[in-house]
Image (spheres, coloured by chain):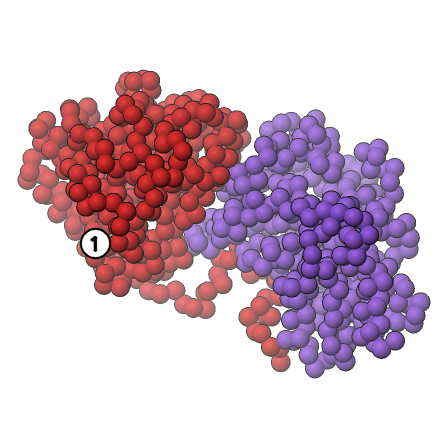
Amino acid sequence: MSAAKSRKSPDAAPAKKKAVAIDDRGGDLTGARAASRSKSASKRSPATVKAGGGVGAGRISYRDAMRAALQEALQRDPRVMLMGEDVGRYGGTYAVTKGLLAEFGPERVRDTPLSELGFVGAAIGAAIGGLRPIVEVMTVNFSLLALDQIVNTAAVYRHMSGGQFGVPLVIRMATGAGRQLAAQHSHSLEVWFAHVPGIRVLAPATVEDARGMLWPALQDPDPVVIFEHAQLYNLEDELPATVSDDITHARVRQVGTDVSLITYGGSLYKTLDAARELAALGISAEVVDLRVLRPLDGDTVLASVRKTRRAVVVDEGWRSGSLAAEVMARIAESAFFDLDAPLARVCSEEVPIPYARHMEEAALPQVPTIVAAVRALLNR
Amino acid sequence: MNTMKTRIRPATPAAQGSGTDVPAPPTGPVPFDRERALMLLGGMLRIRRMEEKSAELYGQGKIRGFLHLYIGEEAVAGGMIPALQPQDNVVATYREHGHALLRGVSMDRIMAEMYGKAEGCSRGRGGSMHLFDAQARLYGGNAIVGGGLPVATGLALAARQLNEPRVTACFFGEGAVAEGAFHEAMNLAALWQLPVLFCCENNLYAMGTALARSESRVDLCAKAASYGMQAGSIDGMDVVAVHQAALAAVKQVRASLAPIFLELRTYRFRAHSMFDAELYRDKAEVQAWKTRGPIHTYTARLKAQGLLTEQQFLALDRQVAEEVDRAVAFAEAGHWEPVGDLLRDVVAARQDEADAPSESSGVAP
């Protein structure tokens, strides 16, 4: 905790983060549209999450926001339990679950062996059996050991059983590079999960989403995978008094007119920084945070692109077969004649993430590469 | 009822890893009242006749996909499933027609499922390998070898945490013992003391690979025991031995909440699936095992004991044949789910998903 609080912001999101204007109402959307959107959200989950939840609104770290969400879930629903490697005594690899063992005991905050296939499968069974497990998998790289259970059981169970059984399970995992952890701890494999029908994939990038997405994910009768970019845990920001419980829509984080920058997760802040640099060059960039990687909110993306007529997708995944590729394909399918320029993307280089800092930085999308991609598109 | 210690013991002195050592056929008195004794026979016979008809229908193209027959192994499900209570859970493999049937899923709905009809127990979405039934607490029908073990462990975790007196019976073949999922689930179940009854149906061949060709040690009970779990081997061709062991094991798991491992030594008379030329075993070996056939040996014992006459057997068989005929008629009369329902049950409801239209529309206007 103290270590977490002593660091104000992650490497990827310098202190100027506070200056970023978060547009909660969805940027250029009309008032009527925004109203209907919040109405549909409240219909699904009437209990809009209060930021209070034992921690109080105001400035909070992403880690503490996530912990508050977990704590609230454990308090609100006795069926909720946490499972995972070192979630209990150790307090969580990223200290997200620190203190929860003392409050809720070892049955509800359950340390597991290093046994991803086994404990993710057991969480699936427990969910089918009436509990509401939240599984923490240390990183997306390790989750591959459990991919069989996630893809072959959790994602197909409802359909294969003719609708008789669902798997109301939440799986949280860290993703992403930037900490010199090399090629087995740093990859962004969100698209592997977003490829699979039957599961919802979330990528909270803000403290509000870290605080607000978990509870509605638990209300989903089907499996939900939540990707937390490891660079975000130390991010601090203001938590609004009322936290959104929307796990369906993308959101415009910054309104612009010349180009749409579409991104998610840890790349959001690099993209917002790039937008600021572009503004200094007289280019007005709109930033769309996908938030939900499956099912994709095509409407919000298309509305933005139809307005700006240009799009650059920023995605820390590898270029080939990336989420960026899917977003671009949807734009090309549905808004081709609205475009004034070819679609572009900034992805990770197609290389296992290397250890050496300068090489790791070179492998990832960075502010200058995003700026360069936009300038190339606009010939400016 | 004898204690676990006397009931759960090796069926033969040596561990069984090859099909060429064929023990003597099961004999001896049947220690059940007539009603229970005949219930066990009826169960096995229903599985046998339903599957013989399924093979025939497969040949006619009525049933497609993979079809894995349980013929020869009926004493396992036939002895295990009736030892469970209605509140218990069953997790099975892709060779699960018998488990589903004896668990109470009607032959009609099983047959309709194999036809792919909407009246099937999985609405035609699963087929032979994926029979499900919420009411029967049958959680599949899992065609990933070893895939059911972690799920069963989780079902038992839920039962334990919710204070529900459920035993979860998890069936899997000996081939699953080579999977990591087996070892991870055994460890979790023993570590957390979960009420799972692990039922290893050792039919000696994982598809075509004999146990001795895939395991460095063929003593399966030793593997379970290494996790601190009580384990025992049962003659899986003897429905009496299986049922006695099952009653004792289910009772003990329910009382102690601790898992038990049973190895049920059995033999598959038919090919692995309908595509198997059986190059990996001699016909003589199969013939030798057929002398241990679970239905005819048990029938002989019942007759010797005066619990069954030939006429009564024929009457029972006729009754089962009629049930099979009705099931086929039911499946034939069933209807195909409209293609418009294709995306139904991928998730709980389509909700107001943002991309619902673009998911199917492709190019926008």
The answer to whether A281 appears left or right of B16 in the picture is: right
Residue A350 picture quarter = bottom right
x, y percentage for residue B345?
49, 57
Q: Is residue A34 above or below residue B77?
A: below
User: For mark 1, does the 10 Å Cα neighbourhood hold few (<14), some (14 to 19), or many (20 or more) residues?
Assistant: some
What residue is rendered at 67% in x and 30% in y? A88
Residue sitting at x 56%, y 61%: B350
Relative horizontal placement of residue A210, taking residue B158 as reference (left or right): right
Q: How many marks?
A: 1
**Vertical relation: B190 (above or below) B285:** above
Q: In this view, does A139 lie to the left or right of A63?
A: left
Residue found 80% across the figure and 38% down from its top: A55
The chain drawn in purple is: A
Disc 1 designates what residue? B53
Residue B332, position as x, y percentages in the image: 26, 62
Indicate the secondary structure of the residue bearing disc 1: helix
Quadrant location of the N terminus of chain B? top left
Q: In which quarter of the image is residue B353?
A: bottom right
Residue B135 shows in this picture: no
Residue A374 seen anywhere in this rendered image of the structure: yes
- Residue A85, x across and y down, in percent: 63, 35
Relative vertical location of residue A250 with respect to residue B264 in this rendering, above or below:
below
The residue type indicated by label 1 comes to: Lys
Asked which quadrant contains residue A99, the reply is: top right
Q: Which residue corresponds to the image point at 15% horizontal and 24% vertical from the top-left?
A: B29
* B350 and B300: which is toward the camera: B300
x, y percent for residue B233: 32, 27
Please state, as top left, top right, bottom left or bottom right, where the C terminus of chain B lies in the image. bottom right
- In the picture, one chain is red; tell me its letter: B
